[in-house]
Amino acid sequence: MKYFFNTRLGPNRYLLGDGSLLCKDVPIARLGDQAYRAEDLPELTPDDDGEIIVTRSADEVFSPEAMASFEGMTVVILHPEDEAGEILFVDPKNWRELTIGHACNVRRGQGDQSDLLIADLVIKDALGIQAINDGLRQVSCGYNAEYDETAPGRANQYDIRGNHIALVPNGRAGVRCSIGDAQSMASKAKQWFASLRKAVKTKDSAAAEELLNNAPANMVGDDDEDDGVTTVVVKVEGPDAAVPHGAPANAVTDESSDIETRIAAIEAAVKALTDKLSPPVGDADDDEKKEEKKMTGDAGYQQDVLSRAELILPGFSLPEGSKMGTLKREVLGAALRTADGLKLIEPLSGKNPDFAKMSMATVDSIFNGASELAKSRNNSGLSLAVFTANSQSGDVAALNEKNKDFWAKKGAK
C-alpha cells in the first residue's frame, strides 16, 4: 500500500500531509501460547497456578475473516474500561470519545515475521501522536473470540474478530508487538533486560533474537552513565561454555553462534543475576515457584503486581529479577511497619502475620485486598497523560476536550 508523506521520522514512522502520524509494519498479534489469568476467561477452568494457556493457530489468526475484522479498526490509548473495570469495546456511541486513529493494510508478516499479524497504524490525534513519541509503543488487540478447552489450564482460540488496537506500556504479546523505532521503550536498559528474561523463560527464540540484535547502548558499554543496571558478561565459546559469576560491565554475544546456544548462555546469565539480586525470604516452596512461572508467562500480570505494590507501599524499590511472590511478601511486610500500611493490612491479615510462612493463595488475597483498599483511600483517578494501566475512559474525554482546544487555536492562527 502506498502513502504520501512529508517527513520520515524514523524507520517506521512518517509524518503525513495532514500532520497525522503513520506507523508502518506494526506487529499487532502473534501465534503461539499466551498466558491469561482465570478472571480474564471465567468460562474456562484454570490450572493449579490460576492461569490458562491459550493457543492461537495460524489457521485462526490468518483466516480471511480474522484479518478483515481488524481492517479500519480504531486505535486507542490503553484498553478502555467500563465502570466495573471490564474492557469496553469501541462502538458508534463512544468512538468519538476514544479514537486516536485507525488500522489499515492488515496482512500476514513475511520471512522471520511470518508468525505475526502486521498492520499500518494511522494516528490522527495530537495527544496520541505525543504518546507514541514519548515511548508508548507496545500494542494490544481488543477482540472477541471463542475458546475450546482442551484440558484444565489449556484452551484453543478460534473465531477471532477484532474491535480495536490499544497502545499500552506492556502488552501480553511482548516487545515483538510494538511500533518499531530507535526511540522504542525497549531501548531502555531495564526494560530490555526484563523483556529478554521473559523471552528466555518462555522459550520465545524469535523475541530473544530481536532483543539481542537491538541491545541498548548502555548494555554494551557505550553509555557513560551508571543507572544502576547490573550487567553480566556472556561470552559464548561453545554449547557448554560457563558463565562467570559476578562479571562486570559489558554484555557480549557471539554472533556466529546459533540461537539455541545463545539462549542457553543468556538463561544461565539470567539465573546468575536473579540469584544475586533476589534476597532469600524463608524457604522457596512450590507456591513460590508457581508464582515465578506465572510472572514469566504474562507481562500484563507482572505490571498488575507492580502497580498494586506501588499502591500498598508508595516508592518501593524493585530489584531487577525479583520474583513476584517474594515481592508480594516483602511489600506486605515492609508496609506493615508503616502507619498507613498497618491500617490497610491488619484488617485482612490479623495481628503479627508471618508472610514468609503463609501460602501463596493467602498472600495473594491479602496483597490484592490491601491494594484495593489503598486505591479506594487514594480516591483519585490517574491521567492518561502518564500512560498507566489504571486510566479510565473519563480521562479520555478530558483529553478529547484538550485536543479540541489544540485544533481550535491552530485554526485561529
Image: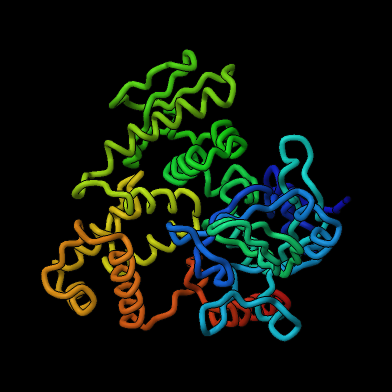
Position above or below: 5 against 78? above
Q: Is residue 71 left or right of residue 184?
A: right
Q: Residue at x 69, y 67 (%)?
A: 143
- Residue at the right extreme, as displayed: 2
Residue 365 appears at what percent x and percent y? 32, 70
In which quadrant of the rendered image does the C terminus lie?
A: bottom right
Position above or below: 270 against 34? above
Position above or below: 213 against 154? above
Which residue is nearer to you in this view: 234 or 358? 358
Residue 251 appears at what percent x and percent y? 43, 27
Which residue is nearer to you in this view: 243 or 183? 243
Asked whether the viewer can see residue 356, the reply is yes
Q: Can you tell which quarter of the image residue 347 is in?
A: bottom left
Q: Can you tell which quarter of the image residue 94 is in?
A: bottom right
Residue 101 appears at what percent x and percent y? 72, 67
Q: Which residue is drawn at 34% across and 42% down?
A: 227
Which residue is nearer to you in this view: 112 or 286? 286
Asked whether the viewer can see residue 226, the reply is no
Q: Residue at x 72, y 50 (%)?
A: 57
Residue 340 appears at what percent x and percent y? 19, 75
- Residue at the left extreme, as displayed: 352
Q: How many labels does the image show?
A: 0
Q: Residue at x 32, y 26 (%)?
A: 248
User: Colour scheme used in the picture?
Assistant: rainbow
Q: Is residue 284 left or right of residue 324?
A: left
Q: Can you tell which quarter of the image residue 171 is in?
A: bottom right
Q: In this view, does 158 lie to the left or right of 364?
A: right
